[in-house]
Image (cartoon, rainbow, N blue to C red):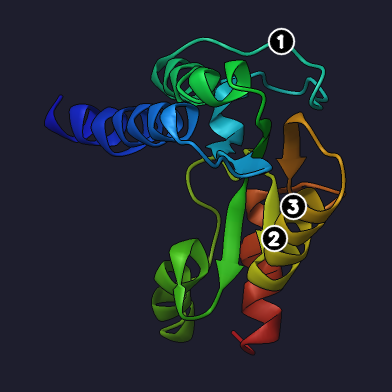
């Protein structure tokens, strides 16, 4: 419960504060990138999802909806708002990949749970390119900031094992 409150506060409340500040500013930015996450779709099993898919149910989906809605004051003030829905960011010095590398290096590579979970991933460099594109082009609303093809978690584990010779 405490971690969930922390997630809501750090994402939703900070975005509300920022969006209200932008709306009240005499000079406003042209664009606001208000990030979100692919968790907004919830667990949909084998269903193929894209930006036009309805949001799901559960805590992460609720958090994503609230997070994106928090930018409404900026939208109402005429600021172009884009919501990159970020997937699992792969970068060896942080995020999910950094946490996975240590066990893999010790030979503890394998699927998490069933391994059938879909991983919509993106490298840090690809994510930064997507964010720059959204700043420079007339991107508005939600877009999935992920690589074009998700993989199953067991596939990701196998790839990591191969890359690290495990």
Q: CA distance from mark 2 to mark 1?
A: 23 Å
Instruction: Place residue 52 in its image quadrant.
Output: top right
Quarter holding the N terminus is top left
Q: Are marks 2 and 1 in contact (CB under 8 Å)?
A: no
Is residue 154 visible to us here?
A: yes
Q: Residue at x 48, y 27 (%)?
A: 23
- Which of the two discs, 2 and 3, labels the residue nearer the N terminus? 2
**Which label sits in the foreground, 2 or 1?**
2
Residue 8 horizontal/vertical position (percent)? 30, 28
Q: Is residue 6 left or right of residue 60?
A: left
Residue, far left:
2
Label 3: which residue?
135
Is residue 43 visible to us here?
A: no
Residue 31 horizontal/vertical position (percent)? 67, 42
**100 w.r.t. 31: above or below:** below
Where disc 3 sits, the SS reads helix
Label 2: which residue?
127
Label 1: which residue?
54
Nearer to me, 54 or 117: 54
Where disc 1 sits, the SS reads loop
Disc 3 residue crowd, few under 14, some 14–19, many 20+, Cα 10 Å: some
Residue, far bottom:
165
Residue 74 horizontal/vertical position (percent)? 55, 26
Q: Residue at x 25, y 31 (%)?
A: 9
**Which label sits in the foreground, 1 or 3?**
3
């Amino acid at each position: 419960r405490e971690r969930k409150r922390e997630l809501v506060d750090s994402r939703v409340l900070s975005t509300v504060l920022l969006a209200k500040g932008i709306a009240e500013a005499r000079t406003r930015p042209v664009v606001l990138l208000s990030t979100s996450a692919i968790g907004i779709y919830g667990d949909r099993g084998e269903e193929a999802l894209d930006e036009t898919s309805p949001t799901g149910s559960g805590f992460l989906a609720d958090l994503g909806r609230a997070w994106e809605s928090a930018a409404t004051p900026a939208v109402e003030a005429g600021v172009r708002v884009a919501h990159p829905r970020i997937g699992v960011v792969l970068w060896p010095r942080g995020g999910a990949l950094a946490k996975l590398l240590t066990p893999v290096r010790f030979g503890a590579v394998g699927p998490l749970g069933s391994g059938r979970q879909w991983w919509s991933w993106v490298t840090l460099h690809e994510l930064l390119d997507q964010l720059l594109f959204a700043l420079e082009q007339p991107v508005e609303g939600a877009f999935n900031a992920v690589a074009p093809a998700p993989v199953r978690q067991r596939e990701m584990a196998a790839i990591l094992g191969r890359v690290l010779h495990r």
